[in-house]
Amino acid sequence: MGPGVAGRAKDLVGKPPTLDDGRPGGFYLTRFRNLAEKHAKFIRGYGFEGGSGSAMFPRGTDTHGFGASFKEEVRKNQGAFIGMGAFGEVLSRYENYVELDPVVKDKWGIPSLRFHYKFGDNEHRMAEDMKETAQEMFEAAGFEIVHVSSRVLTEGWSIHELGTARMGNDPKTSVLNQFEQSHDVKNLFVVDGSAFVNASCQNPTWTIMALCWRSCDYLAEELRKGNL
Ligand SMILES: Cc1cc2nc3c(=O)[nH]c(=O)nc-3n(C[C@H](O)[C@H](O)[C@H](O)COP(=O)(O)OP(=O)(O)OC[C@H]3O[C@@H](n4cnc5c(N)ncnc54)[C@H](O)[C@@H]3O)c2cc1C
């Protein structure tokens, strides 16, 4: 997360605020990189999430003035701002892992988690493309660009709380099989976000639920057969 762009729809400056089509939501641009064509600099991809319209507080990074002139500037531009930021996939890397702290415990005596997590070259090259593409899209749409952000937010900022009991066929490199059943303990199923190997670039909840459903069907069938 981090790279993105903010712009202004010049046609809307100075226009009275309206409800338009009454839809209060933001917008989402689905992943488009490395689907049909291969990008030269990175693998996988990213999506954009954005929003526009009127907000309770002044938006935009170039609202200048003080007192009456500031208020006028805010009113004039109210509803004309649009912005979007990218959400990219971080590749799973062997060097990225968590471990139980041997010393620090929480107040219930459970060991704290220690994170070892760094972005790699693929993520930084992807971030470069996020910034350039966001700009390109806004320019093509005719928006006046007011701010471009190229700063990648620190590791752990964008967190979807997935992984640590990864799914895989090989018990040596994974904890769960494809039905989220523990390789080591056959009557243990972990039907949450822990099974993910990485977080892709999408929101994960529907996939967590779909996997859980599939695992529960399997669990019920195994139970019926007397295998558990
Ligand atoms: C800020 C933020 C925004 C997000 N936005 C979205 C979004 O828009 N769309 C989307 O799809 N996903 C979103 N996610 C991701 C999504 O919420 C998580 O991936 C998902 O909740 C993970 O589900 P889970 O069941 O694996 O874990 P969790 O939902 O974290 O559930 C774990 C549960 O275990 C409990 N627990 C922990 N330790 C113990 C213990 N020792 N004993 C008993 N209970 C314990 C916790 O209290 C918690 O209730 C977002 C996440 C964050 C942090």
Image (cartoon, rainbow, N blue to C red):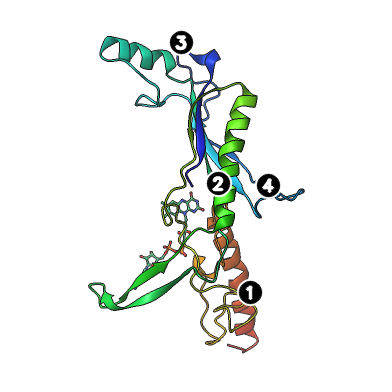
Q: How crowded is mark 4: few (under 14 residues within 10 Å), some or many (20 or more)?
A: some
**Under tag 2, what secondary structure?**
helix
Would you name the residue on which mark 1 appears?
Answer: 178
| Cα gap from disc 3 to disc 2, whole angstroms | 34 Å
| Cα gap from disc 1 to disc 2, whole angstroms | 31 Å
| Cα gap from disc 2 to disc 4, whole angstroms | 12 Å
Task: Indicate the position of residue 201 as horizontal and vertical percent values.
Answer: 57, 52
Task: Indicate the position of residue 86 as horizontal and vertical percent values.
Answer: 54, 43
Q: Residues within 10 Å of mark 3 (few under 14, many from 20)?
A: some
The answer, for residue 25, to whether it is visible in the render is no
Report which quarter residue 226 is drawn in: bottom right
The answer, for residue 61, to whether it is visible in the render is yes
User: Residue drawn 56% across and 56% down?
Assistant: 121
Please indicate whether residue 139 sits to the left or right of residue 100 in the image: right
Would you name the residue on which mark 4 appears?
Answer: 33
Task: Indicate the position of residue 138 as horizontal and vertical percent values.
Answer: 59, 28
Of callouts 1 and 3, the N-terminal one: 3
Query: Label 2 sits on what residue type?
Result: Ala
| Cα gap from disc 1 to disc 3, whole angstroms | 56 Å
| Cα gap from disc 4 to disc 1, whole angstroms | 27 Å
User: Residue drawn 62% across and 89% down?
Assistant: 227
Would you name the residue on which mark 3 appears?
Answer: 14
Q: Residue furthest left?
A: 107
Q: Which of marks 3 and 2 is in front?
A: 2
Query: Label 1 sits on what residue type?
Result: Gln
Q: Nearer the viewer, mark 4 or mark 1?
A: 4
User: Residue drawn 64% across and 46% down?
Assistant: 31
